[in-house]
Amino acid sequence: MTETQKHAAAFRQIIKDKKQFLLLTHLDPDGDALGSACGLAYILKKMKKQVVIGLCESLPVRYEFLNRDESLRFLQHERINLSKYDAIIVLDASTPARLDKFENQIKSLGSEVCLVNIDHHGDNSRFGTLNIVDTDSASASQMIIELLGARALDVNSAWCLYAGIVHDTGSFRHGVNIKRAHEAAIHCLVFPVDSKQVYNRLFSLETEVALRLFSRALSRLNVAERGRIVYMYLVDEDYREFKAEPDAATGFVNRLVMLEGAEIVLFFNEAESNIIKVSLRSNIEFSVGDFASMFGGGGHVRAAGCRIEGIMEKVIERMVKALRLSLEIHDRRNEAKGQG
Ligand code: 5GP
Ligand code: MN
């Protein structure tokens, strides 16, 4: 049996044996975080299991479409007692710190508690009692399909897991092993999943507020290193001025990636006063995940993030300076490779 087959067998056994499940995912959950959690929740419900999805904040409006028949149960942190569940499954989160308000409770669980960690991030700390980490998978949602097989799916789970794959691959444009991502997605499209609607829900700017906020961010477009580094920012006053929700800027960074010549793209977002969430994207073989880890964050080669406390101007200055240096090292290495 290969490692992958062993993992799949162990995971299948757990979902067969246990009855009450708690599903958790990372803070500021995105389309893969919630796509994998909702998709797995629908699979478990089909198996007549009890399942709750634990969140730190309420479900973002953008992702309400994943709760397709409104039968999924979401509970906020304060209302969850971890010891009530037979198994806890953590999706798309590389470390307990990514679980935000659940961090301390997860860290203090005894080894007798069944804690399954399903993730595709390279910096995963293997904090579960069963760790299924596949860095060759483009999304956690794809992993659920591969672990449980196409026969586990129904229309609701297919819809959610497809959304997760579309999210993390930027609609099949990037991500590791894109062939595998397509193969998993095709199992979802056996069902009447409306791929156009999924795309629009995930990536379209559908509110006036979001468009105005985007226009503000664009008005602060900056380029450095002759266009190789591109960045923009939003401060907390912008959110107040437009009466925008904290998640209104979801996906803004992905729009900058399209700029010709841009190699590394950054979006500095002060959604909370003095806490700056930085989203990074790379168009080249430079790992923004490794770069973000120098600032306490993480992620993948092409997409990563971190949170930095401080004043916007200072944070931007510090990070762009560090990025210039890292790019210089990257260039030198490439040159050496070319010559060698
Ligand atoms: P986004 O920019 O879309 O929020 O995140 C892009 C990728 O980076 C995702 O895979 C996400 O999980 C990861 N990421 C974002 N912020 C952080 C962070 O603060 N810490 C870590 N470890 N990963 C992050
Ligand atoms: Mn993911």
Image: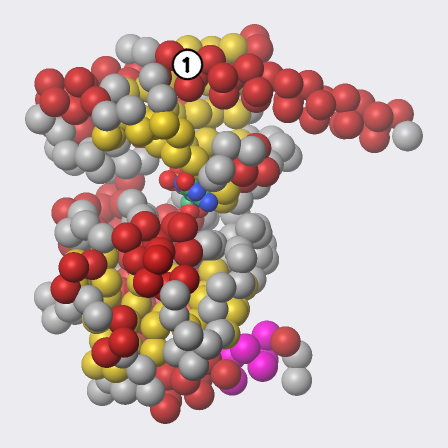
Quadrant of the rendered image containing residue 261 = top right
Question: Label 1: which residue?
Answer: 314
Which amino acid does the dot numbered 1 rest on? Lys
Q: Is residue 288 left or right of residue 251?
A: right
Of the 4 image quadrants, the one containing the N terminus is bottom right
Of the 4 image quadrants, the one containing the C terminus is top right
Q: Is mark 1 within 8 Å of ligand 1?
A: no
Of the pair 223 and 28, the residue shown nearer to us: 28
Please state the horizontal and vertical placement of residue 11, each as a whole percent of the image: 46, 80
Residue at horizontal 46 percent and vertical 54 percent from the top = 95
Please state the horizontal and vertical placement of residue 178, each as a whole percent of the image: 54, 53
Please state the horizontal and vertical placement of residue 123, each as a whole percent of the image: 55, 51
Residue at horizontal 45 percent and vertical 65 percent from the top = 118
Quadrant of the rendered image containing residue 73 = bottom left
Q: Is residue 94 left or right of residue 159?
A: right
Q: Say whether residue 318 is magenta.
A: no
* Residue 164 versus residue 324 in the image, above or below: below
Q: Which residues are magenta?
A: 4-9
Of the pair 294 and 209, the residue shown nearer to us: 294
Of the pair 33 and 206, the residue shown nearer to us: 33
Q: Is residue 130 left or right of residue 1?
A: left
Mark 1, other Cα within 10 Å: few <14 / some 14–19 / many ≥20: few
Q: Say whether residue 7 is magenta.
A: yes
Of the pair 151 and 32, the residue shown nearer to us: 32
Residue at horizontal 23 percent and vertical 78 percent from the top = 84
* Residue 160 versus residue 242 in the image, above or below: below
